[in-house]
Each structure stands twice: as structure tokens, then as C-alpha cells.
Image (cartoon, rainbow, N blue to C red):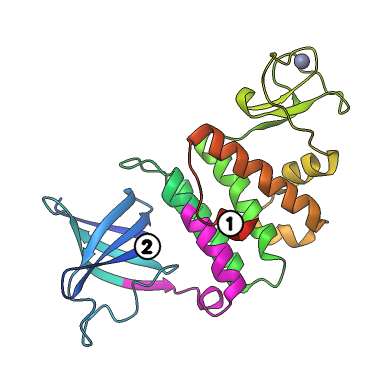
Amino acid sequence: MRNYKTKGIVLKSMNLGEADRIITIYTEREGKVAAVAKGIRRTKSRFGARLEVFTDLNLIIHRGKSLDIITNANTIDPHLGIVSNLDKINYGYAMLELVIKTAPEGQTDARLYQLLAAALDYLNKTDIDSGAVLVTFNIKLLAITGFLPNLSVCVVCGDKDKRTVKYSPADGGMVCGGCRASGREVFTVKEPVILLAHRLLYKHFVEVEAVPIEKRDVVELARLLRFHLAYHLNIKLKSEAFLE
Ligand SMILES: [Zn+2]
């Protein structure tokens, strides 16, 4: 099949030549895709404003020899509640950047599309702290991609003693004093932060409102997750400066 139909969310948009744009999309069927929207910068473009960043779409894409070409785009949700709020835009961009940097090329994961769509839908309409939405997205993303740190017990011996078990990026989770390899960096993680991580991981976004959340725990958890990502995936996030 030269054409495929898929849902997808616009992650990034870049000018190409005189009138075209390369649109990076996380699609449900084909994972991360870069496809050309021909003539989109002309005033009478049939795409209009439908291929803006954050938009969730039904798409028909033609498989090209070098680049794919978007032949049809219908809006599911433009997420205007994000686009019209500077705070939400910044948190939303951080989510998109996480997907851009963690999603491997040529690998499809429909769950990642569904997670991003659910997170943006929620961010779009909620009044709760956008940082809590981002950290919930972040922890679920790590679970899907297989990089979730084990924050319950010592990953070596299973010790649960909160006083001695510390987070060790190199070990992929918590380690106790007895199992800690010499020279490896460890960080103390406060118990409420670990509790928050577990609460958010198993909740749907709409249930996050009911979770008792302390802003400082959100900030600390977000920092731990970013550190974990940077260590294991060797990525540096542009949105980091804003989030700090
Ligand atoms: Zn141990």
C-alpha cells in the first residue's frame, strides 16, 4: 500500500523550500514520521491551520521514495486551550520534546500515541497545575519505553528500609547501603516523592485531580525523572531550562 491512514499528533513543523513544510508527527500506526505538507504556506492552502503543533489529526499519508507526503488531514482536536495559554504551551512543548527525543525512528508504539493524546486532551481543559500533568506524562512515558526507575525497593536485594535506600541512576533505581557499588553516585529521595510517583503511574489523567499533590514533591520527582532520562538515554532537553 502506497497510502496509509492513521491518527497522529503534530510535534514539530519546519519550512521547506518556497511553500512547503516538513511536519513531524507521532502517528498511531507508524510511530514518528516526518512528512511533507505541499503548498501549506500558500494563502489558499487546503490544509489551512490544520497542521499546527499540538493538533491531533486523522491523516492520509503517501509513502514517498525519500519523504512521505501528507495527502489529507482532518482535525480531531486542535487543543486550542493549550495554544492560548503561555504556561500550558511551555509544559506542552516539554511533552512533545520528550516524545521527539525518546521515540526511536521507525518503531511503532500505538500506546505512545494514546498516552500523548490523553495528556494533551487533559492539559487542554484542566485547571490543575500543569507541572503535575507533565510529571504524570513523564512517568507513564518511562513505563511505556521501559526506562522506568524502580523506586520501591533496593533493586539488588529487595531491602525496603527508607532510611538507607537511595536512588542510583547507574543502577536504574533504588539501592541500599549494603548493595551500593563504590564510586556510584546516589541521591536521597524523600518518601512523599516516591509515594507520588506510584500514585501518578497507575492513575488515568482525569484521576490526577484527586491525588493530593504538594508542589515541591512534583518539582523533585520531575527533576529525578529528567536526571534518569538524561543518564539512560543520553538526551538533553531544551525545555529543561524552563522547567528548572
Ligand atoms: Zn540492597
The vertical placement of 155 against 53, above or below, is above
Residue 78 placement, left or right of 169? left
User: Do the residues under discs 1 and 2 have CB atoms within 8 angstroms?
Assistant: no
The vertical placement of 150 against 12, above or below, is above
Residue ID at (54%, 80%)? 84
Residue type marked 1 = Ala
- Lower sequence index among marks 1 and 2: 2
* Image label count: 2
Q: Where in the figure is residue 160, as x and y percent of width and height?
A: 83, 23
Residue 2 belongs to magenta span: no
On the image, which quarter does residue 44 sit in?
bottom left
Q: Which mark is residue 222?
A: none
The answer to whether residue 202 is visible is no
Q: Which mark is residue 241?
A: 1
Residue at label 2? 12
* Residue extending farthest bottom: 43
Residue 94 belongs to magenta span: yes
Q: Where in the figure is residue 54, as x and y percent of width and height?
A: 45, 67
Residue 43 placement, left or right of 164? left
What is the span of residues highlighted in magenta in the rendered image? 74-97
Residue type marked 2 = Lys
